[in-house]
Amino acid sequence: MNSALPTLVGAATEPSTDSTRFLISDLCAELESYLAPEQINEVYRAYLFGAEAHEGQTRKTGEPYIYHPLAVARTMGEMRMDHRAIVAAILHDVMEDTRTSKERIRAEFGAEVADLVDGVSKLTHLQFQTKAEAQAENFRKMMLAITRDIRVILVKLADRLHNMRTLGVMRPDKRRRIARETLEIYAPIAQRLGMNRMRRELEQLGFAALYPRRFAVLDASVRQARGHRREPMQKIEAAITHRMEAAGIEARISGREKGLYSIYRKMLDKRQPFKKIVDVFAVRIVVADVDTCYRALGVVHNLYKPVPGRFKDYIAIPKSNGYQSLHTVLFGPHGSPIEIQIRSAEMDRVAESGIAAHWQYKAGDDHAMTAQSRAREWLKDVLEIQNSVGSSIEFLENVKVDLFPDEVYTFTPMGEIMVLPRGATPVDFAYAVHSDVGNHCVTARIDRQLAPLSARLQSGQTVEIVTAPGARPNPAWLSFVVTGKARSGIRHCLKSLQSDEAAALGRRLIEKALATLGQGLGQISPVRMDQVLDAMKIPDIDSLLVEIGLGNRMAALVARQLVGQEPAQEVCEGSGSALAVKGTEGLVVNYGRCCFPIPGDPVIGILSAGRGLVVHREACRNLGELRERSDKTVSLEWSNEPGAEFAVSVRAETANRRGALAEMAAVIADHGSNIEHISFNERDGHSTAMTFTITVRDRRHLAQVIRSLRRLNDVLRVQRSRG
């Protein structure tokens, strides 16, 4: 530090004389190891600014508030962050808790620091319906700030870490809420960014605060196990050290203990007691470089036999957060399993600090840059999710899905590695490649074999996505995709499709309603249209058409308003010429699964709010009094050329004979029909009743299928199911 700075520090009045308290002088001394003197002066100036802004404020602990920003800055200093990030750490609460504006921070410390402070600040000036919505919007703002500058989350994590260290002074209910939020959001974010040291402490503190009794019991169990394992572990470490020396390998060998929260989660996931969790203790071997990692692996495999199927090479294929290491499990003395982790010194540093390692060491460090690039890739996906979701709560849920990636490593046909969460499907893979690929995928080839889009991917598989220009997402995909990017992409595309299709249906409904009044939509003057839209508080005609198409507004009532007529006592949507349906209208025209209408059936339309038009057979038993509700019904007829296949239910009774079902399935397939579902109900020992849901083009096609089924020797009776 330059000679002027000690005088400056000495001139300051410290808030406390407690020698154990971390002071600004301690921070400056720590920063001397890697920052320039003028940068340390800037940090000190920020301290004076923050101390003045927080003058008179105290924390729940009773200490002056400035101690908290100093503690946050200390954590940032331990991560070897740049001076602007440390300045932002000292000032991170001044916008929220004092009258200091962003403009003043920009004037004093520059736009970069002001943006960092703003990104960390909470949304205190907005009103929300619920606390959950406020927390979700808070999280959304933070994540968007991170996409602009990754240092925002590092300040936020350091802030949360100090809050967790001083959580004991909070009310029990608030303590539990903060602890749960830490375990569900902040610790997983730290893990996603490869910051394992930060993640472990957040999990430990969060676990102790949320489940104090479980923490105490598990802590006692680990302490007891540690005592029993101390001597065997020392012997294992000594044996490994001896073998490494004999092989001429310089290595740092140390025992590692799994975090209590990780043990707790494993006990829950595997539903096992503590005594059956075998990887509580492990041995970490740190060597000079990548080549030596593989040499060291050979040494330990010659010392103890490896457990088959438990070797993982995260050096060749790093984890999604940049983590690299060799993992293997060995049969130790007396057959007890030993987990071994082997990595280089650079890998060890990145494994502990993750993305923060980018600032600790200069450019050219490939390992640190791997963590940085993978974090950027994840944040790019976060930004894409933000652009395609509606509410903040939906955004939070989608991102939380991606914060727990138990990874599967798959390959594109060109050999590029795609890292996905466990349980991922070809649809998740397609959206990971690009949103357009996901939106237009129709099937997939896994290791060159056709596979359904719902198949669960396994590590090592090569996945090829087959797309078609006219394809679009299926709502059923939402039941099996696992990534937030795929889920938000499907929902966004479906919402857009539904709006377009609802507008098209709404136009047909309003034109039909206006025709009964001797008008057309093009004949309504712009002035009259604006008056009606203002009265309804709808921004434009497209939004009005969407509302009508979704069944939220009656076309007949809107038509009367447009032509200036008073609404009649009895408004009949079904009056006038019938609306033609053909099966390709999309998401806003649905077909009742109670009666399965098909072309040729007399049909009626029921307007359902939010769903649009639901088509039923006129004889459907479920309609009940709805059939008499003229405000809910629409007269329908089938188009001369239906453009789709329709589901229909067929009931068949067959003799109990092997191969009967196969014969029926073959007949159905021969007629170009597809079986969607089969249910069985054995009536007695001689016959079985089955209900098929099959697809047909119209009543004639269905009649052909039924006639062919009746010709089979084992079929006793076949008929169409009645709604």
Image (spheres, helix red, strand yellow):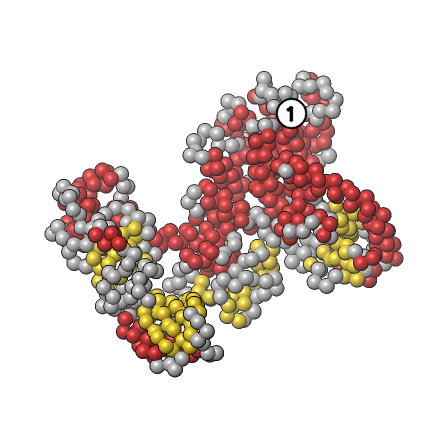
On-image quarter of the N terminus: top right
Measured as percent of width and height from the top left, residue 375 is found at 58, 48
Residue at 63%, 38% in the rendered image:
211
Residue at image point 47% right, 44% down: 395
Q: Residue 93: percent from the left, percent from the top?
A: 56, 28
Query: How many marks can you see?
Result: 1
Left-right relation of 501 to 306: left
Q: Position of residue 27 (x, y in %)?
A: 69, 29
Circle 1 packing at 10 Å, graded few (<14), some (14-19), many (20+), is many
Between 73 and 687, the one nearer to me in the picture: 687
Q: Which residue is mark 1?
A: 67
Is 97 placed above or below 326 here?
Answer: above
Residue 316, relative to residue 694: is it above or below? above
Q: Is residue 194 above or below residue 113?
A: below
- Asked if residue 58 shows in the view, the reply is yes
| Residue at 59% over, 30% down | 172
Give SS at disc 1.
Answer: helix
Q: Residue visible at 38% across and 81% down?
A: 712
Front residue of this view, candidates 96 and 133: 133
Tell me: residue 703, above or below residue 220. Answer: below
Name the spot of residue 723 as percent of width and height, x first: 31, 62
**Which quadrant of the figure has residue 477?**
bottom left
Q: Amino acid at mark 1?
A: Tyr
Q: Which one is in front, 27 or 632?
A: 632
Quarter of the view holding residue 622 = bottom left
Which image quadrant is residue 190 in? top right
Residue 218 left/right relative to 395: right
Q: Residue furthest left?
A: 518
Q: Is residue 395 left or right of residue 197?
A: left
Using the image as rendered, state which of residue 130 and residue 508 is in the foreground.
130
Residue 82 in sight here: no
